Amino acid sequence: QVQLVESGGGLVQAGGSLRLSCAVSGGTFSHYTMAWFRQAPGQEREFVAGSSWSGGKMYYTDSVKGRFTISRDNAKNTVYLQMNSLKPEDTAVYYCAADRKSSAFLINTRINSYDYWGQGTQVTVSS
């Protein structure tokens, strides 16, 4: 059984930084495309960032480019999201997700492409 556990969320002032972590157990982490999604109150869940199997290819939604960085450590079965220059509009529950069906360099942005999900971690950015 594959499990994803996020950590690192919290309350931060605008302009601040947070680093989210997602530890994965029970599967073949190095063969999963990994991604971060977020869902703000009253809004649909949206793709934020994704990483290919090796971490050599990343993809970001436009609103976080230049501020967020996704990375992964395949030896630790962990994916990270470094979030800098946070804005109030970044406030959301952040979820990590794993796509076990993708090829090595494919990063899907659709929710239904992902097979496994974490429970989410709250990020709140105050103005």
Image: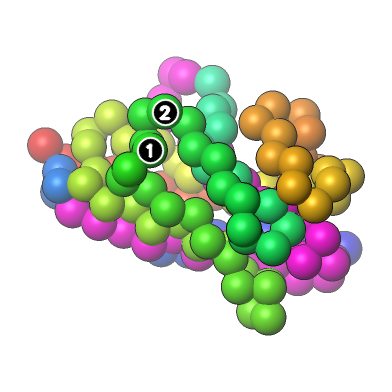
Asked whether the beta carbons under mark 2 and mark 1 sit within 8 Å of each other, the answer is yes
Task: Tell me where residue 76 sits by quadrant.
Answer: bottom right
- Dot 2 falls on a residue whose secondary structure is helix
| Residue drawn at 22 percent across, 37 percent down | 87
- Looking at the image, residue 51 lies above or below residue 55: above
- Dot 1 falls on a residue whose secondary structure is loop
- Looking at the image, residue 125 lies above or below residue 27: above
Cα–Cα span, label 2 and label 1: 5 Å
Seen as rendered, the residue at the extreme bottom is 75
What x and y, as percent, mark residue 70?
49, 54
Magenta span of residues = 16-43
Does residue 74 appear left or right of residue 18 in this picture?
right
What x and y, as percent, mark residue 118?
64, 52
Does residue 17 appear left or right of residue 4 in this picture?
left
The residue identified by callout 1 is 65
What x and y, as percent, mark residue 65?
38, 38
Does residue 7 appear left or right of residue 58 in this picture?
left
Quadrant of the drawing holding the N terminus: bottom right
> Quick one: label 2, few (<14), some, or many (20+) residues within 10 Å?
few
The residue identified by callout 2 is 62
Q: Can residue 47 be seen in this view?
A: yes
Q: Is residue 9 visible?
A: no
Q: Does the magenta stretch include residue 31?
A: yes
| Residue drawn at 82 percent across, 60 percent down | 31
Which mark identifies residue 95? Answer: none
Does residue 44 appear left or right of residue 107 in this picture?
left
Give the amino acid type for the residue marked by disc 1 in the picture: Lys
- Looking at the image, residue 8 lies above or below residue 98: below
Q: Looking at the picture, tell me which residue is in the foreground, 127 or 28.
A: 28
> Quick one: label 1, few (<14), some, or many (20+) residues within 10 Å?
few
What x and y, as percent, mark residue 56?
62, 58
